[in-house]
Amino acid sequence: MELFIYDWYEKMSAEAAKKVMHIISAKRKTVLSPASGDTPKGLYAELVSMIHKNKTDISELWFIGLDEWLGMNGDDEGSCRFYLDQQLFNPLKIDKNKIAFFNGKAQFPWEECRKVDNTILALNGIDLAIVGLGMNGHVGMNEPGISPALHSHVAEIDHITQEVGQKYFKEKKEISGGLTLGIANLMEAKSVMLMVNGSKKASILKQVLEENISEKLPASFLRNHPNFSVYADAEAASLLKK
């Protein structure tokens, strides 16, 4: 595990974007799995700016959605796909055929999960998964108690995540379920980047990185990944052992 701590969120985002650019530039075909949410927003803005400034060839840049709320898709403001369309896919003018994303409105959600897993296999795996950290230690929509052996699956959303998730919507939404890559998918990715910022995440980051690896803290399983990096700002890292 590599841990990178920066004084400011903006610096953390810029340095994380440099790493993503390095991965994109190192091989012609790159598969990214980006998380939605507030934390990676700065990274995406930096990445879009770098790609445009450097006129980087992204014709072979592919995306696998990390997760989506059950009953939603890109047409719903506040959905994971809507967020990433606004922050990443549209600014980069990514061909929709190069985006494999869970459709939370699908009639058969488990078939959606299988389709995403099959796409990952067809693309020879995920090169980099960019994930955030939930207040209860979840990653993607892998909530406490989930088996690390699961690949893409339909998830039951923890009450803490339901409460926190309301911030993405203008009106109260039912977000008790979701479709998500599993811990097994993340462990099979070539690299995983965990981004964490703000003092509110200090306690849970300390638990994830310093307590025993267990199903109670799903993100802790990532410590067993051979290419796992953590990008944190000083506030989020304030409780970590020196």
Image (tube, rainbow, N blue to C red):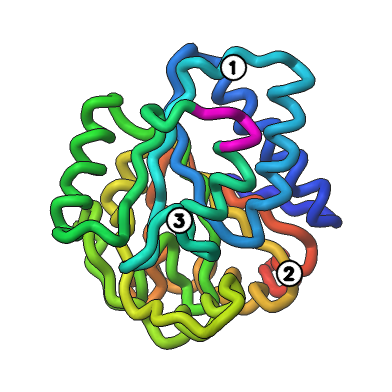
Say what amino acid the circle numbered 1 marks: Ser
Q: Which residue is identified by label 3?
A: 75
Name the residue located 39 percent from the left edge and 57 percent from the top edge: 73
| Residues shaded magenta | 90-94
Q: Position of residue 225 (x, y in %)?
A: 40, 46
Of badges 3 and 1, the one in the foreground is 3
Q: Earlier in the sequence, mark 1 or mark 2?
A: 1
Residue in front for this viewpoint, 227 or 104: 104
Query: Alpha carbon of mark 3 to alpha carbon of mark 1: how far?
Result: 32 Å
Q: Which residue is identified by label 2?
A: 198
The label on residue 25 is: 1
Say what amino acid the circle numbered 2 marks: Gly
> Is 93 part of what is drawn in magenta?
yes
Q: Is residue 90 left or right of residue 222?
A: right
Say what amino acid the circle numbered 3 marks: Asp
> Is 40 part of what is drawn in magenta?
no
Q: Position of residue 29 (x, y in %)?
A: 43, 17
Vertical placement of residue 94 versus 231, above or below: above
Looking at the rendering, in which quadrant would you find the C terminus?
Answer: bottom right
Q: Element under label 3?
A: loop
Vertical placement of residue 36 versus 31, above or below: below
Q: Position of residue 239 (x, y in %)?
A: 70, 74
Residue 124 visible in this rendered orientation of the protein = yes
